[in-house]
Amino acid sequence: MESETVFHTGYAALVGEPNVGKSTLMNAILNQKISIVTKKPQTTRHKIMGILSGENFQVIFLDTPGLISPKYLLQEVMMKFASSALDDADVVLFLVDAEKARSVGVQESARALEKVMSVHLPSAGKKTFLVINKIDRVEKSDVLPMIDGLRKAFPFDEILPISALNSFGTGELVATIVKYLPESPPFYPPDIVSDAPEKFFVSEIIREKIFEQFAQEIPYSTTVDIVAFTERTAKKHFISAEIFVERQSQKGILIGKKGAVLKKLGEQARTEIESFLGHAVFLELHVKVREKWRGSEAWLKRLGYGNQIKN
């Protein structure tokens, strides 16, 4: 009599400093865009779940905001999302940027990593990997000395060099994660890749386009609230979104002369939303000023951050 296949299920938290490629890695592993990605740091604000189901495993990835020292309430909330992911995780994946490590020197990178690990040390019993990303941007001869230098920062269970952008090493990474997950039936149906509603992804797509089109402080002072989402089988879906900024001058920049800038933003966002939903969309955008919303408990709760704010 053949024995039943052992099934492994668990959570893997993706953590690290801003711009190390956490969101790119999760998207590459899932072969689907779940987290928005831009060249600017601190794009991710939430804990975003991505679910990978295989024949004998289910890995629930948790993408998190980049680790920083918070300067206002929104950033404090972002760090709580990262901490909660560490609490939930069976395996913690600490990502570092190989190109940055090479540029500042391996010894300096090891000291910086040691400092980060001391502040954000996972709870006892957590299996912890060091994932060295962006190795496609360094010479092959740099990789082994980098591994040797960085392993001194913390007693990692595994160290894996990868290129998330090129999907190099991602298969080995997943296989290694599965080995450390507990035996358990799957937590989610095998045909879903996230637990977040479509409204959340629509708001994230709009916010991504803002990050791509605008410089300096505007993307960080902006958030998006979906106020209407009506699915219509025979007609275009109707979506109405409010874009909040903190100052009147920012509103003017977002709208542009005769609304030209906002129109361009809407066109780019609509195209990607339609691709994501697989349905034609009528997208309506409004820009509103909410002064200091990033430091307001009331506004952050309204915008979906309430479970990370103490009452």
Image (cartoon, rainbow, N blue to C red):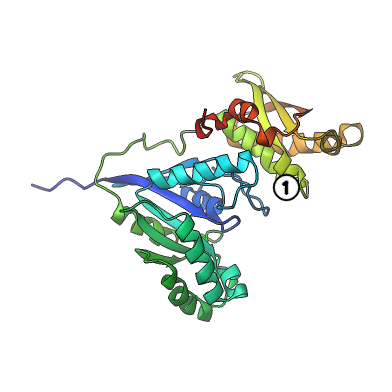
Query: Looking at this view, is 225 or 257 the one in front?
Result: 225
* Mark 1 crowd level (few <14, some 14–19, many ≥20, 10 Å Cα): some
Quick one: which residue is furthest to the left in this view? 1
Q: Is residue 162 visible?
A: no
> Residue 182, how many percent across, how many down?
26, 48
Seen in the image, is 179 located left or right of residue 111?
Answer: left
For image coordinates 12% across by 48% down, the residue present is 2
Element type at mark 1: helix
Q: Between 241 and 236, which is closer to the camera in this rendering?
A: 241
Looking at the picture, tell me which residue is in the foreground, 120 or 97. 120
Measured from the top left, where is residue 227 in percent x and y? 66, 22
Residue 288 x %, y %: 77, 27
The tally of labels here is 1
Q: Is residue 280 left or right of residue 106?
A: right
Question: In x, y percent, where is residue 293?
Answer: 69, 32
Furthest toward the bottom, the residue is 141
Q: Is residue 15 above or below residue 290?
A: below
Instruction: Determine which residue is flagged by label 1.
Output: 212
Q: Quadrant of residue 200?
A: top right
Amino acid type at image mark 1: Glu
Vertical arrangement, residue 285 with respect to residue 193, above or below: above
Identify the residue at image location x=57%, y=29%: 304
Residue at x-position 54% and y-position 61%:
166
In the image, residue 133 above or below residue 31: below
Q: Nearer the viewer, residue 258 or 11?
A: 11
Q: Residue furthest front?
A: 311
* Residue 243 in sight: yes
Name the residue located 8 percent from the left edge and 47 percent from the top edge. Answer: 1
